[in-house]
Amino acid sequence: MSPISAPPRIFDSARRTARLVRSARRFGEADFLHMRAADNAVASLEVILRDFAEVVDLSAQPEPFAALLKASIAAGRVGPVQVVGDTASRAAPGAGPLAVADQSADLAVSLMSLHWANDLPGALSQIRRALKPDGLFLGTLLGAGTLKELRGVLTEAELERRDGAQARVSPFADGFDGAALLQRAGFALPVTDVDRVVVRYPDLFALVRDLRAMGETNVLSGTIRPLTRTIAARAAQLYAERHGEADGRIPATFEIVHLAGWAPHESQQKPLKRGSAKMRLADALGVAERTGEDPV
């Protein structure tokens, strides 16, 4: 039996931690994606009429969720919220043991952090194990459509000036795999939704300033070859040519994938077993049943 190989090391956790530390001072200037993710999580809690006494927040940037929850009608049913681990551990979901006891949390939240996980299924499995039976997980991560415009122009500009192009934008997960990922990690009743946001900037450099303030710049593993001023200027030119709007501004697409799942519990609804239906579909629809052998 062959040994199980470790997941590939796509992201450099030390580099990610450094980006977060450096961005802390300016995070409030560009926290709009995190606020949007937190708003969705809080809105979900407002319509789930139950108490969550033991709550853990695994987000690398926990401030938006705390602020919006405090002002929410759900505040009296949720908390207090425990922020788990230090910046380094929250910067690399799933990289080490989760500092939460198994089956101890009623609610676990991880907003805008899981797209940096080298082992996303493993990180989700850790969260599921930390939940009590029938405990809830709410998460968000950036999806595959994020920064598609920037990815394209950086690659094209670098190919023009160098023999090859280095990856500059993370390989974000496909949002349509969210429910499957949750099921693979052992969650019941998985739900996923994709929120596409287009933000308009004066130019590429204004976009990059926001990404730095968010702590969302390149943390791919390996040596990062710096972009020259010539390549950066060419990328900005291509961005304006390919995507520029009538007023001269450029769009930047962000794809936020919202995840929700429950730790399994016997009280939860389960799909009926195959063959257990008491009525034929044709009867329910009021139509004649047809098989593949029926004449057309």
Image (spheres, rainbow, N blue to C red):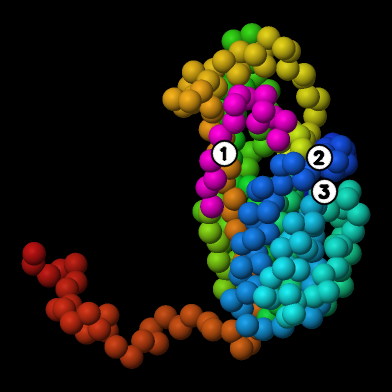
Q: Position of residue 113 (x, y in %)?
A: 74, 51
Q: Is residue 186 visible?
A: no
Query: Would you say 294 lies left or right of 59 here?
Result: left
Density class for disc 2 (Cα within 10 Å; few <14, some 14-19, many ≥20) is some
| Residue position for label 1 | 199
Q: Give me the C-alpha separation between circle 1 and circle 2.
A: 18 Å
Q: Looking at the image, is mark 2 or mark 3 nearer the viewer? A: 2
SS class, disc 3: helix
The residue identified by callout 3 is 91
Whether residue 16 sits left or right of residue 290 in the image: it is: right
> In the visual, does 258 lie left or right of 17?
left
Q: Which residue is mark 2?
A: 26
Q: Earlier in the sequence, mark 1 or mark 3?
A: 3
Identity of the residue drawn at 77% across and 38% down? 213
In the rendered image, the residue lying farthest to the left is: 295
The answer to whether one can see residue 74 in this image is: yes
What's the residue at 71%, 36% (across, down)? 211
**Hey, what amino acid is under mark 2?**
Arg
Q: Nearer the viewer, residue 106 or 184?
A: 106
Residue 293 coordinates in the image, percent (x, y): 15, 68
* Three-letter residue code for mark 3: Ala
- Taking 282 as reference, is 175 above or below it? above
Magenta stretch, residue numbers: 195-210
From the viewer's perspective, is 247 left or right of 17?
left
Horizontal and vertical percent position of residue 174? 56, 48
